Image: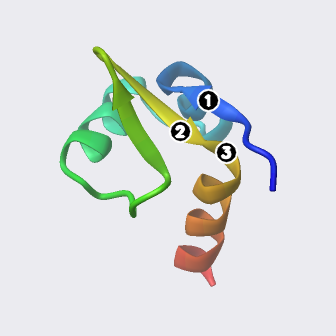
Amino acid sequence: MGYEILNTKEVAKLLKADIRTIQRNAEAGKYPKGVCGKHGRHWLFNRIKLMEYIFNECV
């Protein structure tokens, strides 16, 4: 299984959401384990896990 890592700006663009909303959700722990993690001051997201999470939430 491959990994495509996205930063907060890329996730916001992909989801058509505000960058701060993505950051706040990550800081609040609203994404399941494996979807995102903090590297220094930056949040990084696993695109495949993020899309699985979104799909499962919407279905």
Q: Position of residue 10 (x, y in %)?
A: 61, 25
Q: Furthest residue to the bottom?
A: 59
Please indicate whether residue 29 sits to the left or right of residue 35 in the image.
Answer: left
Q: Name which residue lies at 39% across and 39% down.
A: 37
Residue 30 appears left or right of 54: left
Q: Residue at x 63, y 84 (%)?
A: 59
Labels 2 and 1: the sequence-earlier one: 1
Residue type at mark 3 is: Arg
- Residue 22 percent coordinates (x, y): 39, 37
Relative image position of residue 38 (x, y in whole percent): 34, 30
User: Which quadrant of the view contains residue 11?
Assistant: top right
Give me the C-alpha separation between circle 2 and circle 1: 5 Å
Badge 2 marks a residue whose secondary structure is strand
Point out which mark residue 40 bears. Answer: none
Q: Residues within 10 Å of mark 3 (few under 14, many from 20)?
A: many
Q: Does 47 sit above or below residue 31?
A: above
Residue at mark 3: 47
Please report the residue visible at 67 percent of the width from the left and 45 percent of the height from the top: 47
The scheme the figure's colours follow is rainbow
On screen, residue 42 versus residue 24, left or right, reads right
Give the mark, 1 or 3, whose residue is nearer the N terminus.
1
**Pointer 1 with pointer 3, Cβ within 8 A:** yes
Quadrant containing the N terminus in the rendered view:
bottom right
- Distance between the alpha carbons at the discs numbered 3 and 2: 6 Å
Residue under label 2, please give it. 45
Q: Amino acid at mark 1?
A: Leu
- The type of residue carrying mark 2 is Phe
Q: Residue at x 38, y 57 (%)?
A: 31
Residue at label 1?
A: 6
